[in-house]
Amino acid sequence: MQGTQIRPARPDDEERIRRFLTGLSLHTQTLRFFTGITTPAAGLVRTLLAVDERRDALVATVAGGEIVGHAMSYKGDCADVEIAVVVADQWQGFGLGPRLIETLLIRAAVRGARTVGMDVLGENRRVLRLIRRLWPDATMKVSSGSVEVTAMINHAVPFAEQRSGATPLTA
C-alpha cells in the first residue's frame, strides 16, 4: 500500500496512538477491543506500545507519522503467539491489515513461534473471511460470542528458517 510504512511501535508514539484510538469509529473499536473507548486509559496506551521479550507491537503510519494501523502479539496460552490488529476506518479494505499480520507473524516466527491464536468477535465477518483465506485449516471454537482461532504460522516459516535477524518493515 503506497504511502504507508510499517515499523515497530515506540514509547514516543503515545500521543499518536491515543489519537488513532479516539479516531476509530465505535464499531471498529468494538470489533477490536470488544467495547467502545471514549478516552483511552494510560494503561491501554502503554500496553499497545509495549515491546519486550513477551510482546511485539507494530504501527502503520502515513506521511507526517500519523498512525493508521496497529498490530500486536504476545506469548499466548492457547498458541505460541496471540495477535490483535486494528486499522483506521478509512484505511480498511486496502490490504493494510493483512500486511500488518504478515509482518507481525514473520517477526514472531523468527523468535520461534509456530502457532498463532486470536479472539475474534463473532460478528466480525470480514476478519473471519480473512482467517479462512489465510488459514483454511485453522481451528475455530465459538465461545461467548467470540471465535477462538488457532492456526499454524506456515507462511512465515521459510523466512524464520533462514535465521535472519532482519524483518521487512516498510512497504
Image: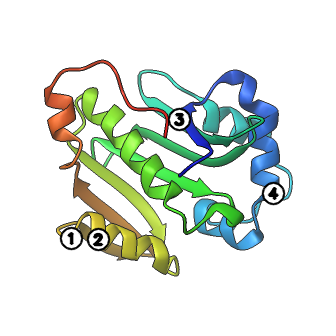
Q: CA–CA distance between discs 3 and 2? A: 24 Å
Q: Is residue 62 visible?
A: yes
Which residue in the protein does label 1 denote? 136
* Residues at circles 1 and 3 in contact by the CB criterion of under 8 Å: no
Q: Indicate whether 87 appears above or below 92.
A: above
Q: CA–CA distance between discs 4 and 1? A: 33 Å
Q: CA–CA distance between discs 1 and 3? A: 26 Å
Residue 100 drawn at (x, y percent): 47, 47
Q: Is residue 108 left or right of residue 67?
A: left
Task: Tell which circle, 4 or 1, labels the residue nearer the N-terminal end.
Answer: 4
Task: Tell which circle, 3 or 2, labels the residue nearer the N-terminal end.
Answer: 3
- Residue 133, numbered circle: 2
* Residues at circles 4 and 1 in contact by the CB criterion of under 8 Å: no
* Residues at circles 1 and 2 in contact by the CB criterion of under 8 Å: yes
Picture quadrant of residue 134: bottom left
7 or 128, nearer to the observer: 7
